[in-house]
Amino acid sequence: MLVYIGIDDTDSPRGMCTTYVAARALRAAEGEGARAADHPWLVRLNPNCPYKTRGNAAVCLPLEVERSGFDRVWEAVLGVVRELAELENGADPGVAAFPEENRGHLERFYFRAVREMVEVEEALELAERYALAFWRHGEGRGIVGAVAAAGASVGTLTTYELLAYRRREMWGRERWVDPESVVRMDALFGDRTFDNFDYEKGEVRLTPHTPCPVLLGIRGTSPEVLPEALSVLRLGEPYEFYQVFRTNQATDVHYQRLSVKDLRPLVSAIVTGRVVGRPRIGPGGHVFFEIDDGTGSVTVAVYEPTGKIREIALRLVEGDLVEVYGAVKAKPQGLTLNLEKLRVIELRQVYAARAPACPVCGKTMESAGRNQGYRCERCGHRDPRAQKVLVAVDRGIRPGLYEVAVSARRHLVRPLRLEAALRASAGT
Ligand SMILES: [Zn+2]
């Protein structure tokens, strides 16, 4: 039978990583006769969740298991979770196994766990009704991610990530991957991988900066290419093993299209509206502007680490039609949307008043004095009734989609590079 085992909240700020626990649990399950029915799923949940450890990731193991062998597989998975989870440092793991035929009851919960805040009680209720078995440590919220990951909608799992893990004696130490080898890998496999290198900052993007067991991760749109890409890299240490995950990263699945009046804290929204007033740059280089969609107005915050997109935001003027993507936060001055992507839909034509051109020779004329019209310095033509003319101003930006710097982009946000690739593959 097909069984989906969700695992969550095994890590703490001091170490571990749920993907590593899951990869080890998969091997233990295989040792008891289970067979992987798909790549394990690395499922990102609401990035605005205040309880998350880091990237708010849970994992699901899709397994083909003999009905009679399920108990042994379940015990093997639990054994790995109990052994590796950071129980002393605040991890509250949850594990839940669901049969294929019950997954449909979990899908709505999955989408809610990605897009808003869900309660532990809802997850427990689903586990009690539909799970073959479930376990949680303490009062743990881990059961939320376990149920959500097991219920993940397959249609949203369209990208992959290879994670290579460090040998235990290296955990917590400095990581090193030769930057030149990353650039070479990106040149060879850049059409099917993404987020390898930040060329703006000259920075390798594959390695995390946490004490967890992950050495590096390579993200891509095809699972086959990832081990090949790994083989090109020059590493400062041998890895223990690697695992390719199927993920909902870089898919924009966390966004909801909302009007301003329906915005709530801790959701990720897409709002279409017109710019009100003038964008302003504050201390620290943060840029803010207001948009109104007819139901209300909201402040859009474009923080300094988002990089060059701030220059686009600063060029907006009142009346421009834009679509903003971002996380909604409650601030003392009201709701704020932290910008992740910006679509400029329509730019208002802006005019500037300029001195008129000379009708005789074409040179820009000079003012002849207050209320005395204009005169031409080159040919001497005078026109006492000439007035300033309105000239269309080049706005310096174009309609289109803009994104934040690679280093500021969140796991679930789809990079522009993939937008183009996905449009091409969809033939639109
Ligand atoms: Zn002239």
Image (cartoon, rainbow, N blue to C red):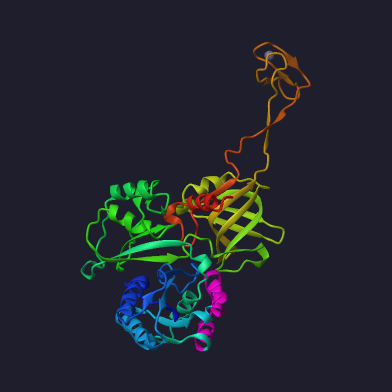
Q: Check the image and report above or below for 142 versus 163.
A: below
Q: Quadrant for ligand 1?
A: top right
User: Which span of residues is magenta-colored?
Assistant: 104-128
| Residue 105 percent across, percent down from the top left | 56, 80
- Residue 8 seen in render: no
The chief SS type of the magenta part is: helix
The residue lying at 29 percent from left, 52 percent from top is 232
Q: Between 176 and 239, which is closer to the camera in this rendering?
A: 239
Q: Check the image and report above or below for 117 versus 184.
A: below
| Residue 156 percent across, percent down from the top left | 52, 65
Residue lying furthest top: 379
Q: Is residue 362 left or right of residue 306?
A: right
- Residue 235 seen in render: yes
The residue lying at 29 percent from left, 49 percent from top is 181
Looking at the rendered image, the quarter that the N terminus falls into is bottom left
Q: Between 40 and 58, which is closer to the camera in this rendering?
A: 40
